[in-house]
Amino acid sequence: MSILEDIAAQQHEFVGWRHALHENPGIGFAETFAAELVARKLEEFGFDEVHTGIGGTGVVGVLQGARPSNRVIGLRADMDALPIMEETGKPYASKVPGVMHACGHDGHTATLLATAWQLARSRDFAGKVVFIFQPAEEGLGGALAMIEDGLLRRFPCDRMYAYHNMPGLEFGRMLTRPDRLMAGSIFFTIRVQGRGGHAAQPQATVDATQIASNIVMTAQSIVARNIDPVQTGIVSFTDVYAGTNSFNVIPDKASLKGCLRFFDKQIGDAMAERLEAIAKGVAATYGGEVEVEFEEIFVPLVNDPEATSVAIAAAIDIVGEDKVDGEITPIPGSEDFAYMIENLPGNYIWVGTGPGAMPHNPGFDFNDDIIPVVASYFCRLVQIELA
Ligand SMILES: [Zn+2]
Ligand SMILES: [Zn+2]
């Protein structure tokens, strides 16, 4: 029997877990149902170690192979849901009003549990597999919380792997690349202080709206004029605010929010530096002042070339060569797994789940049929890494 057939025979069990997770979602750091289910299952499978409460609600399970080796492979899934009111109408729809698994992290968790179940039965590998179930992937810092709580020190891994489902992409198609796969992101807030006054007496004011508008326009020169043209970056303003709903008051204050995106941390830092200089320079030109605040949300997700070759080899063994693309164009979205593999080699791969609503949409539902496919991929990865 192939790994895939072996795992698929247990599919009803995996789907039961996935639907239980879907019914009982928790947003970042409140994934108590998932964390308890995961810990209980890992104990049931006879894991050597199960640790809970790492970085909040994170869970780590350690499985020792039948053959000795010092090599350790990490496999990671995310467990958090989103603040969205579910509209799937499914019988296992969320029981928590305003919270739903709209990104498929319930499916990622079930997939990693299916992998744990299969590997615990055979333990047919040399070394250790560390199963990492992380909280708060959706921009709330779950990976860093686990790392700051000693994840990588207590469970050092030689390499780490993870996946994300991708609806709209052919079922079973697997996409990755050997270096920069996803963008880093820095959020920014710019507060402009001018001097308000009557719209008929502009000479007595420092117009905050004029300063803010000029900052928005000039900031687009950062990518055009300050970044090496073979590199790339994005400057997006997402919130522009000034005024009090009047027609004859020049506002004294304005605020701008947005994000910088980049595939290289140094480029991100350079963009932030330029944005601050432009904001201060424009404000000074017109006699106003600014305060600029930055918040690093994600670092770029950079795959390791060797880990990626293993991922590609494992993917080809499970879904076939024609369904694997190891050289896709980088994707400007961000992913918390970037922190997990910031200082250790790893790979992140996208897996197509066929037609369906897009992630973060109230109609989204994870395609259960992909669970045995990706669990088989993870098992194959472990076979290759820990042969
Ligand atoms: Zn998401
Ligand atoms: Zn996601």
Image: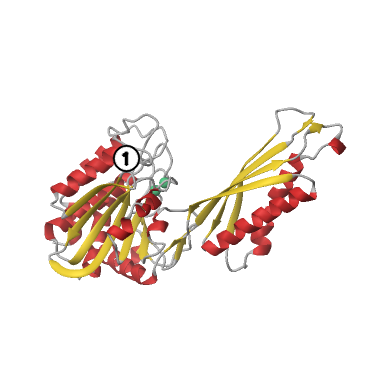
Q: Residue at x 74, y 27 (%)?
A: 246
Q: Residue at x 33, y 55 (%)?
A: 150
Q: How is the image coloured?
A: secondary structure
In the rendered image, the quadrant that contains the C terminus is bottom left
How many labels sit on residues? 1
Q: Residue at x 57, y 60 (%)?
A: 269
Residue type at numbered disc 1:
Glu
Relative to the observer, which residue lies in front, 167 or 114?
A: 114
Location of residue 351 by image quarter: bottom left
Quick check: is the Cβ at mark 1 less than 8 Å away from ligand 2?
A: no
Relative to the observer, which residue lies in front, 382 or 142?
A: 142
Observer able to see residue 147: yes
> Element under label 1?
loop
The residue carrying pointer 1 sits among few (fewer than 14), some (14 to 19) or many (20 or more) residues within 10 Å by Cα, namely many
Whether residue 37 sits left or right of residue 146 in the image: it is left
Q: Position of residue 14 (x, y in %)?
A: 21, 46
In the rendered image, the quadrant that contains the N terminus is bottom left
Whether residue 333 sits left or right of residue 319 in the image: it is right
Query: What residue did someone put label 1 on?
Result: 31
Q: Position of residue 341 (x, y in %)?
A: 38, 61
Q: Position of residue 239 (x, y in %)?
A: 61, 41
Q: Residue at x 39, y 55 (%)?
A: 337
Observer able to see residue 166: no
